[in-house]
Amino acid sequence: MDIPERKDFRGANLIGANLQGANLRDADLAEADLQGANLTKAKLQGANLQGAYLRGASCEKANLIGSNLQGAYIQEANLQEVNLQEANLQMANLQEANLQMANLQEANLQMADLQGANLQMADLQGANIQGSNLEGARNLSFDQLSKVKTLYETKLDDELLIPLKDKYPALFEEPK
């Protein structure tokens, strides 16, 4: 589905909207309410979703490369196989979100809340998770966390925190 030329949806009420496969590249969806929306396979490269409300949204296989989700509320959303490479998720609420097999390479997850999120097979290579809360995150592995940019001030469960600090102490140092 191609969206008309107008791509300014700031603050729009899109609750439950079916935007499956929609081309929303570079769209402005700041503060939009997308609760329960279907964004499966949507093209959202470079989109501005700052402060957007995506609770319970379905975003499987969506392309969000380089998008801005700073401060977005993405609790309980399905982000399975989503591409969030180089996306800005700073201070985003991703509690209980399904990020199974998500591409988070080089993403900015500073101070994001990932409590209870499913991170099974998510690619965190080069991700900045400084100050994030990963307590209770599900299916998160030592190997995944060993590839991030930094773990400085990140909250982790002890079963991951202790061995990571032992083997990769530089990850816990303040970034320069």
Image (spheres, rainbow, N blue to C red):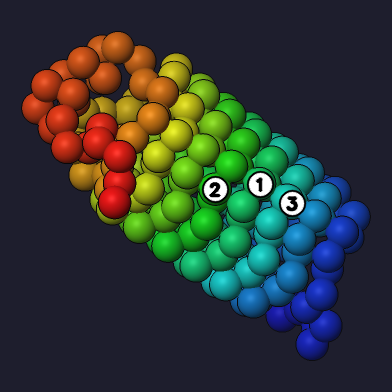
C-alpha distance separating marks 3 and 1: 8 Å
C-alpha distance separating marks 1 and 2: 6 Å
Q: State which quadrant residue 8 falls in.
A: bottom right
Number of residues whose C-alpha sits closer than 10 Å to that of mark 3, classed few (under 14), some (14–19) or many (20 or more): many
Instruction: Give the residue displayed 80% in from the left and 55% down from the top.
Output: 31
**Amino acid type, label 3:** Ala
Q: Is residue 101 visible?
A: no
**Amino acid type, label 2:** Gln
- Residue 89's x, y, as percent? 54, 50
* Disc 1 and disc 2 in contact, CB within 8 angstroms: yes
* Disc 3 and disc 1 in contact, CB within 8 angstroms: no
Q: Residue furthest top?
A: 158
Q: Which mark is residue 52?
A: 3
Give the residue pinned by disc 1: 71
Q: State which quadrant residue 122 falls in.
A: top left
Give the residue pinned by disc 2: 90
Number of residues whose C-alpha sits closer than 10 Å to that of mark 1, classed few (under 14), some (14–19) or many (20 or more): many
Please give left or right for residue 22 compared with residue 120 in the image: right
Give the mark nearest the N terminus, 3 or 2: 3
Disc 1 is placed on an element classified as: loop
**Amino acid type, label 1:** Gly
Q: Is residue 104 visible?
A: yes
Instruction: Give the residue displayed 37% in from the left and 48% down from the top.
Output: 128
Disc 2 is placed on an element classified as: loop
Where is 97 relative to 157, above or below? below
Q: Which mark is residue 158?
A: none
